[in-house]
Amino acid sequence: MKHIIKLITRRIVFAAFALLIQIIWGVVLMYQFQNYNTYFSIFFDILALLIVLRILNKWNNPSYKLAWAVPILAIPVFGITIYLLFGRSGLTKKKRRRLEAVHQIFKANLHQNKKTIQEISNMDMGIKRQVDYIYNLSDFPIYKNTAQRYFPTGEAMFESLIEDLKNAKHFIFLEYFIIVEGKMWNTILDILEEKASEGLDIRLIYDDFGCNQLPARYYKSLQAKGLKCAAFNPVRPVLSVVQNNRDHRKILVIDGKVGYTGGVNLADEYINEIVRFGYWKDVGIRIEGDAVANFTVMFLEMWHYITGINEDYMQFDTQKYLNGQIAAEGFVQPYADSPFDRETVGENVYMNIINKAKNYVYICTPYLIIDNEVMTALTLAAKSGVDVRIITPGIPDKKMVFLMTQSYYEQLISAGVRIFQYKKGFVHAKSFVCDDEIATVGSINLDYRSLYMHFECGVYIYHSSVVSDIKNDFLTTLQDCENITLDFCRKRNWILKTFQAVLRLIAPLF
């Protein structure tokens, strides 16, 4: 009973209930208008057509356009309502300018080293084009002087992260989608309080929706502890397209010279201190050196976007705290993905890796809700003889999304893609590795919301031993996976398959 009371009194539940009432009210009201007069019915039909034409005129992926066009034209009142609430970004040009303001301050320092890019050109022009794509779109360069360390579990990453936090001397920046009070967060918070008392500049950004288990206005209690804190896009029980966009990044920057990212949030399930959905398989990466500058700028852009505070951001120039050359190999390019972008940067990085693969491409993803372009790339690679393997969860965190993920299996397996479900529990890792040369680790899921609506980040890695670490971790994880066959797909109940087909129709909502 206590658990039920606690659940229904959570602010996210209250907000969701309030939003549901408003949606129902809006749909009922529009239906009444439609039934009241034939002209209203004609009006909604014309409005639906105009909205679909506007969607088709956008630069979005065709699959995304089609997924919205069908329900809007088929059920105009309901389709229009849902699209206006969940299909559009709430980010305005004014907000875009605020986000870009800090970027312009640092842009001079984010120049691409010509020797580095020439070295990559001499090694592989295909890689050079991918690096140029990221840089030309976002101004985030690729670097050499950067050490990397891959973590195959959240537990291993947590241990390293705590050690680095304790050694911080100047500033600590944290940007996370989920924070939940428990061993992981409380341990980190104790260190942050101590460092704040020593005079370090401690800043935290958390997504208010992702952190819905925290008390309302939790940032105020952190500010009282000496931390500078801001909540991204606070959840309100009022319908607003702004609620569509979330900060899904996982970024930790220490003194501008050490950075972390990956799938790991600041909650106990990520380090398997508590059990949710079996064993929680996640990954992370630590970088040290020049490439941390990209993460520093990403964080400060978001900080300025949320707070609107003008200050001397150049005080965080990463070159101030780097101690010369770092023993490192390979090339590292942290990159960002944003709803502001006309292109889905994260998806295009993934697509480039798939299309470039000669021997193999191995993928870990918690959700496999893909558009036609990714489906075509994966199936074409497999049909061309590339060893394409994908690991998905065996125990889902969201059952509806899991059913949708499984709905893509048959087409992929028929083309030669090998699908594996992790028997021990839930896979939250987001990683690609290809041909012992390229890898990426970050926060970007293979689903519509992550690719189109969220702020995301990742690290593109080339010609480093870390690529082998990621590959070996994938192969080790395979030992705890079930190989999904065509029999599994074809023997499923027809009612379930029909339900999955309906879910795919509304995939952009997930």
Image (tube, grey):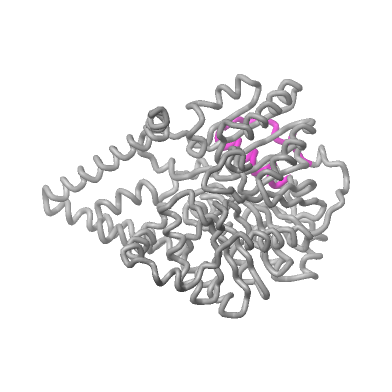
Which residue is depicted at the point 73% across and 49% down? Answer: 110
Tell how many labels: 0
Picture coordinates of residue 332, whole percent (x, y): 74, 55
Please indicate whether residue 276 sits to the left or right of residue 317 in the image: left
Specify the segment rendered in magenta.
Answer: 293-318
Whether 268 is drawn above or below 497: the answer is above
18 within the magenta span = no
Whether 463 is drawn above or below 3: the answer is below
Which one is in front, 55 or 495? 495
Which residue is depicted at the point 78% across and 46% down? Answer: 288
Picture coordinates of residue 111, whole percent (x, y): 74, 52
Please indicate whether residue 224 sits to the left or right of residue 394 in the image: right
User: Does the rendering let one see residue 398?
Assistant: yes
Quarter of the rendering containing residue 356: bottom right
Which one is in front, 99 or 331? 331
Picture coordinates of residue 262, whole percent (x, y): 64, 49
Which one is in front, 93 or 335? 335
Whether 61 is drawn above or below 231: the answer is below
Residue extending farthest left: 37
305 within the magenta span = yes
Which residue is depicted at the point 44% across and 45% down? Answer: 244
Quarter of the rendering containing residue 315: top right
Picture coordinates of residue 448, whole percent (x, y): 47, 56
The N terminus sits in image quarter:
top left
Residue extending farthest bottom: 384
Question: Principal SS element in the magenta part?
Answer: helix
User: Does the rendering let one see residue 139?
Assistant: no
Please indicate whether residue 410 sits to the left or right of residue 347 in the image: left
